[in-house]
Amino acid sequence: MPVLPLNQEDWEILEGCPLLRHCSPALLDQITQEGRLEFFPTGATVYSPSHFCRCLGILLAGRLQVTKGTLTVSYLEPGDLFGAAALYTEAPEFVTTITARQSSRCLMLPQNSMDRLLAQDGPLRENYLRYLTGRIRFLSGRLQSLVQSGAEGKLARYLLANVREGQLTCAATDLARRLGLSRASLYRAFQSLEESGLISRHGKTISISDPAGLEGFL
């Protein structure tokens, strides 16, 4: 199988990736022989419960958003891994949705390749177990933050996950029901985010003025 056309920056990202840290040059070469490159334009779905492949992905360039329903779980940057939940799952409903927020390029490692590589390479196996342990800790902390999240955080999270071209049109009554908030709490959250210059409202239409600032509420 031909070696993937990776540039110098790609190699640096792979060498710094948590999965491949401290692994041998021979293993990196093997991965370039067994993996495949995939490209995703802005807005494309990379993974979803109804559309996913049994591959472990490494983001080489771009930015990905990970969501579960209306909840934004995280954003992925170059060097981050994704697809672990889909690699061996028999329950696709637990697969998160991953969307390209920027044009993205990913290295995909199929399940059969991962089986073989994990069996033969000790450092890779240890790195993968550390990664899975870190994900468990991250998701536990994320769940705790959701339990403690105020109305502003719930509203910010929903808007970031559901706006299209910077806007969302939704009646306040429907939005309050989706977020599990009273109308009074929702209007206080609107006021807080508007006064901070993060969003603006015109009737039922909500516009995000500062996406990066809104992420600070997550």
Image: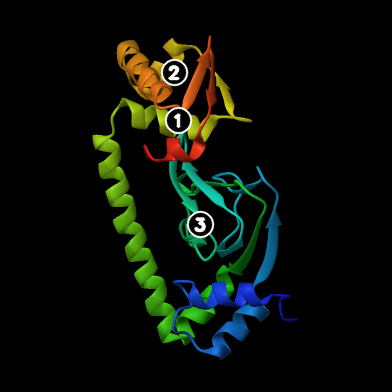
Amino acid type assigned to the residue bearing label 3 in the image: Ala
Find out whether the residues at labels 1 and 3 contact each other: C-beta distance under 8 Å. Answer: no
Mark 1 vs mark 3, CA separation in Å? 24 Å
Residue 4 on image: x %, y %: 71, 76
Residue beneath the point at 62% across and 73% down = 9
Residue beneath the point at 61% across and 84% down = 30
Residue 26 on image: x %, y %: 57, 90
Pointer 3 local density, CA inside 10 Å: few below 14, some 14–19, many at least 20: many
Residue beneath the point at 50% across and 57% down = 86
In the figure, is residue 179 to the left or right of 26? left
Amino acid type assigned to the residue bearing label 2 in the image: Leu
Pointer 1 local density, CA inside 10 Å: few below 14, some 14–19, many at least 20: some
As helix, strand or loop, the secondary structure at mark 1 comes to: helix
Find out whether the residues at labels 1 and 2 contact each other: C-beta distance under 8 Å. Answer: yes
Q: Is residue 72 shown above or below 46?
A: above
Mark 1 vs mark 2, CA separation in Å? 9 Å
Q: Earlier in the sequence, mark 1 or mark 2?
A: 1
Q: Mark 1 — residue?
A: 158
Residue 186 on image: x %, y %: 36, 17
Q: Nearer the viewer, residue 88 or 4?
A: 4
Q: Number of labelled discs?
A: 3
As helix, strand or loop, the secondary structure at mark 2 comes to: helix
Residue 148 on image: x %, y %: 24, 36
Q: Which mark is residue 175?
A: 2
Amino acid type assigned to the residue bearing label 1 in the image: Tyr
Q: Which mark is residue 86?
A: 3
Quadrant including the C terminus:
top left
Q: Is residue 26 shown above or below 191?
A: below
Quadrant including the N terminus:
bottom right
Looking at the rendered image, the disc whose residue lies closer to the viewer, 3 or 2, is 2
As helix, strand or loop, the secondary structure at mark 3 comes to: helix
